[in-house]
């Protein structure tokens, strides 16, 4: 039974990337190509609940198709004390803190004492396949830039699935 719920969560995340992700995009079809500039007024950027994440996480995709080999820009709005458990990506990830504090650490276990606090304007490049985790101090907005396809693999997917499930009860 537990394996079924784990498979369900993985399937839900996959479907969210394919079906829901287009609804999370801020760019219209005319902006999402190489011949037109992409620009947004801050007031036009609308965050939506982040599929496959614990309650409280919000996302907007500013450019790119996360399932394709093309550049992407994502923004996350995370509440105070939000934790993203250890995970890794198959491509480099550039992280810019726009507001709040993002605490970043490397490894397979969350260890807040070994984290580095990045405040507004802070920047980090996380190399492909590096195991890392983050947590917030205060409401925090971050921007992620990289080259797709974007993958996120949790070191302990069972713990992530339990965190998501618990937050939605």
Image (cartoon, rainbow, N blue to C red):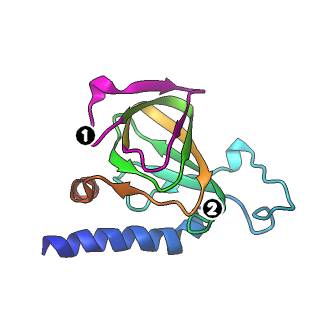
Quadrant in the picture for residue 29: bottom right
Above or below: residue 83 compared with residue 25: above
Q: CA distance from mark 2 to mark 1?
A: 32 Å
Point out the image quarter for the C terminus. bottom left
Above or below: residue 130 compared with residue 104: below
| Left or right, residue 48 beside residue 54 | right
Query: Where does residue 12 sit, x and y in percent of width and height?
Result: 37, 71
Name the residue beneath numbered marker 2. 25
Magenta part of the protein: which range?
106-131
Residue 63 visible in the shown view = no
Magenta highlight on residue 19? no
Which of pointers 2 and 1 lies earlier in the amino acid sequence? 2
The local secondary structure at tag 2 comes to: loop
Magenta highlight on residue 123? yes
Query: Where does residue 93 sit, x and y in percent of width and height?
Result: 54, 46
Mark number displayed over residue 109: 1
Above or below: residue 108 compared with residue 149: above
Quadrant in the picture for residue 30: bottom right
Query: Where does residue 104 sit, x and y in percent of width and height?
Result: 41, 33
Quadrant in the picture for residue 2: bottom left
Question: Label 1: how many residues lie within 10 Å, few (<14), some (14-19) or many (20+)?
Answer: some
């Amino acid at each position: 039974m537990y394996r079924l719920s784990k498979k369900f969560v993985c399937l839900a995340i996959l479907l969210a990337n394919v079906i829901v992700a287009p609804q999370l995009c801020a760019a219209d079809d005319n902006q999402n190509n190489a011949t037109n500039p992409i620009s947004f007024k801050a007031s036009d950027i609308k965050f939506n609940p982040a599929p496959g994440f614990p309650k409280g996480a919000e996302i907007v995709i500013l450019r790119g198709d996360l399932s394709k080999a093309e550049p992407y820009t994502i923004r996350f709005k995370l509440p105070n004390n939000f934790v993203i458990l250890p995970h890794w990506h198959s491509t480099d990830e550039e992280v810019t803190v726009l507001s709040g504090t993002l605490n970043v650490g490397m490894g397979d276990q969350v260890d807040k004492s070994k984290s580095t606090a990045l405040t507004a304007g802070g920047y980090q490049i996380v190399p492909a396949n590096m195991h890392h985790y983050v947590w917030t101090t205060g409401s925090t907005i971050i921007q992620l830039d990289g080259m797709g396809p974007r993958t996120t693999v949790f070191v302990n997917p069972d713990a992530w699935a339990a965190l998501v499930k618990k937050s939605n009860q």
